[in-house]
Amino acid sequence: MKPGHSIHLADEAATIALADALARQLPARAVVWLHGDLGAGKSTLARAMLRALGVQGSIRSPTYTLVERYPIADGDALHLDLYRIGDAGELEFLGLDADDGRLWLVEWPERGAGGLPPADLHVRLEVAGSGRTISFEAGTETGRDWLEKLEEPERLLTQVPDSQGIC
Ligand SMILES: Nc1ncnc2c1ncn2[C@@H]1O[C@H](COP(=O)(O)OP(=O)(O)OP(=O)(O)O)[C@@H](O)[C@H]1O
Ligand SMILES: [Mg+2]
């Protein structure tokens, strides 16, 4: 997928299909900053990635705990939501280390800037009519490789009906 390319996600199933594609190509270690307003679909994408990576049972919202941790293959996934953080210094109380975890999925990362590991991948979500648009920007070589491995978005999203069994 070309960097900066934006994709229309017509419904939640499309967001889930994209999350599955990201999970299929997950690098050995990755930090993802999820940008977007309230209701843009950040948690939907994060939850779908965690599911695709084999997380079973409930996936709690980290709104109040700030972080939730899930074991996945070869490490942990950390899901953060920093909407309610006072300042980036509060991140220290969570006792997280930049080397901790295989995957970081961070909602409202701008509120923790300075206390977070840098993003390999920036994901931007926006409301667009009844759907969403999503765009990506790589922050590191890892992020660039990840984006390159993603299938062409059009192909990816035409797979949605099949994978959802509603074709
Ligand atoms: N592609 C999509 N098209 C239409 N609706 C979607 C899409 N993706 C997610 N949604 C819906 O958007 C709503 C809000 O999603 P979500 O909770 O993931 O947002 P969020 O960005 O995490 O918000 P917050 O900042 O409050 O945590 C949900 O009802 C979800 O079903
Ligand atoms: Mg959310």
Image (cartoon, rainbow, N blue to C red):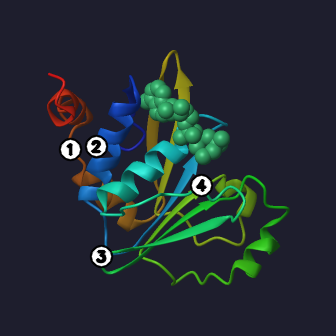
How far is disc 1 from disc 3 in space, using C-alphas?
22 Å
Report the label total. 4
Residue under pointer 2: 1
As measured in the structure, the alpha-carbon distance from the residue carrying label 4 to the one carrying label 3 is 21 Å
Do the CB atoms of the residues marked 3 and 2 lie less than 8 Å apart? Answer: no
Q: Is residue 2 visible?
A: no
Q: Nearer the viewer, mark 4 or mark 1?
A: 4
Which secondary structure lies at badge 4? loop
Spatial separation of the CA atoms under disc 1 and disc 2: 6 Å
Measured in 3D between alpha carbons, the distance from the residue under mark 4 to the one under mark 1, in whole angstroms, is 29 Å
Distance, label 2 to label 4, CA atoms, is 30 Å
Q: Is residue 35 above or below residue 127?
A: below
- Disc 3 packing (10 Å; few <14; some 14–19; many ≥20): few
Image coordinates of residue 30 in percent, x first then y, are: 42, 68
Image position, residue 66 (x, y; %) = 68, 64
Pointer 4 residue: 61
Q: Is the C-beta of the residue carrying label 4 under 8 Å from the nearest atom of ligand 2?
A: yes
